[in-house]
């Protein structure tokens, strides 16, 4: 396009009457090129524009004509400036690309995708970051196999940025270390609580407050899905309840006893109460963070997650999350206000 512009301006400028000067339009060519190409391409287009302006000057009067001399000098200066800004833009793009690469690497270590199959369960996971360059934030999920079943974790650290990521990594680390042990869910929750508490005692003197508060906490759901029983056992630590998709219905698994979030044991001491819900073959359990239910459209209405899921109750986890992702991004206009994490778990029939 810039070269076509140079050719058109050159031809027209040669054939128009002498009192009409279109040479200044050639400045648009290097300026346009700097917006999408690198410094070499911008410098090349600028050089071609200068040559074209020289051809116009020779065709109409001469290069030493005062008007054309000033046009050529101005075009050279604009081309140099455009080339410099193309260099700055390319440098910034390379820097952003490196940051995204680092973010992808960090996410693959801190929050890797869950296995597609574990025991009698089919699993799909999805993380939607509010900031595209960040790739991840304070939302978290994990899965671990035990001798008798599968344990799952989903959570949301308070706040945003590095503070939230640090809190999330602490919980994930504690879960990965302790979840495979043969212990009951209350003991596992206690280990997660102890992991956050020990880190706060170690780094509390230098850690910056999150959103102006002294305490940091993580809402979480800790689940145990036994292989041989059609149930799911869970402890809710101040997290949005999971949704059970069973026989075309969407059932929120509201717990009668909700424990305070992890990290608030000194403020609100409470025992972790395990509650059991049916979870049969072909049922799907959807775990999510509040970034999904608190997403808003242009009218500031919240995303109707339960109503949307009713139409997709028969899908497997991967298809379900794919449809949910597309519908959610359309609902919010392509930009989430907060990070969102989703995990879909389906119990499948045992193999012969």
Image: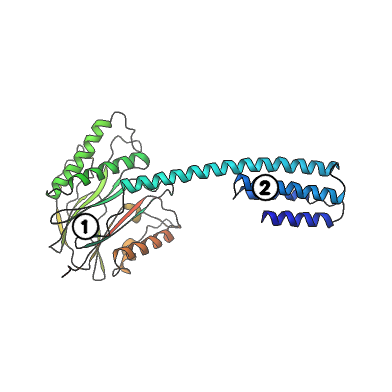
Numbered badge on residue 34:
none
Residue that label 1 marks: 254
Q: Nearer the viewer, residue 289 or 315?
A: 315
Instruction: Tell whether 32 sits left or right of 116.
Output: right
Residue 165: give x, y in percent of width and height: 33, 42
Residue 106: give x, y in percent of width and height: 35, 44
Q: Nearer the viewer, residue 48 or 313?
A: 48
Q: Which mark is first along the chain, 2 or 1?
A: 2
* Residue appearing at x 87%, y 48% in the figure: 61
* Residue appearing at x 16%, y 43% in the figure: 190
Q: Neighbour class for label 1 at 10 Å: few (<14), some, many (≥20)?
A: some
Residue 254: give x, y in percent of width and height: 21, 57
Q: Neighbour class for label 2 at 10 Å: few (<14), some, many (≥20)?
A: some
Rendering quarter of residue 209: top left
Residue that label 2 marks: 44
Residue 87: give x, y in percent of width and height: 59, 42
Q: Above or below — where is 1 with respect to 71?
A: below
Rendering quarter of residue 150: bottom left
Q: Above or below — where is 72 with respect to 328?
A: above
* Residue appearing at x 29%, y 41% in the figure: 167
* Residue appearing at x 13%, y 54% in the figure: 147
Helix, strand or loop for disc 1: loop
Label 1 close to label 2 by CB (< 8 Å): no
Q: CA distance from mark 1 to mark 2?
A: 66 Å
Helix, strand or loop for disc 2: helix
């Amino acid at each position: 396009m810039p070269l076509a512009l140079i050719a058109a301006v050159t031809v027209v400028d040669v054939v128009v009457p002498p009192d009409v000067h279109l040479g200044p339009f050639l400045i648009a060519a290097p300026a346009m090129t700097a917006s999408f190409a690198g410094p070499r391409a911008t410098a090349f287009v600028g050089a071609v524009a200068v040559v074209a302006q020289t051809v116009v000057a020779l065709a109409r009067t001469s290069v030493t004509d005062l008007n054309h001399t000033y046009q050529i000098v101005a075009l050279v200066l604009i081309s140099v400036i455009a080339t410099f800004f193309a260099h700055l833009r390319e440098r910034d793009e390379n820097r952003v690309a490196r940051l995204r690469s680092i973010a992808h690497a960090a996410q693959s270590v801190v929050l890797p995708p869950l296995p597609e199959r574990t025991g009698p369960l089919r699993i799909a996971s999805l993380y939607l970051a509010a900031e595209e360059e960040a790739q991840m934030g304070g939302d978290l999920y994990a899965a671990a196999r035990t001798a008798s079943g599968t344990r799952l974790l989903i959570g949301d650290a308070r706040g945003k940025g590095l503070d939230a990521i640090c809190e999330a990594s602490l919980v994930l680390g504690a879960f990965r270390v302790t979840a495979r042990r043969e212990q009951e869910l209350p003991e596992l929750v206690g280990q997660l609580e102890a992991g956050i508490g020990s880190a706060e005692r170690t780094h509390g003197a230098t850690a910056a407050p999150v959103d102006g508060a002294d305490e940091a906490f993580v809402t979480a759901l800790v689940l145990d899905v036994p292989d041989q029983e059609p149930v799911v056992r869970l402890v809710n630590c101040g997290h949005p309840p999971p949704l059970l998709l069973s026989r075309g219905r969407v059932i929120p698994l509201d717990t009668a006893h909700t424990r305070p979030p992890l990290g608030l044991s000194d403020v609100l001491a409470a025992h972790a109460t395990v509650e059991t819900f049916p979870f049969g073959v072909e049922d799907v359990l959807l775990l999510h963070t509040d970034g999904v239910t608190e997403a808003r459209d242009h009218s500031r209405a919240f995303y109707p997650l339960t109503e949307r899921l009713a139409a997709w109750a028969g899908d497997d986890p991967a298809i379900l999350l794919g449809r949910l992702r597309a519908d959610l991004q359309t609902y919010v206009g392509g930009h989430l206000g907060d990070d969102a994490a989703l995990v879909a778990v389906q119990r499948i029939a045992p193999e012969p």
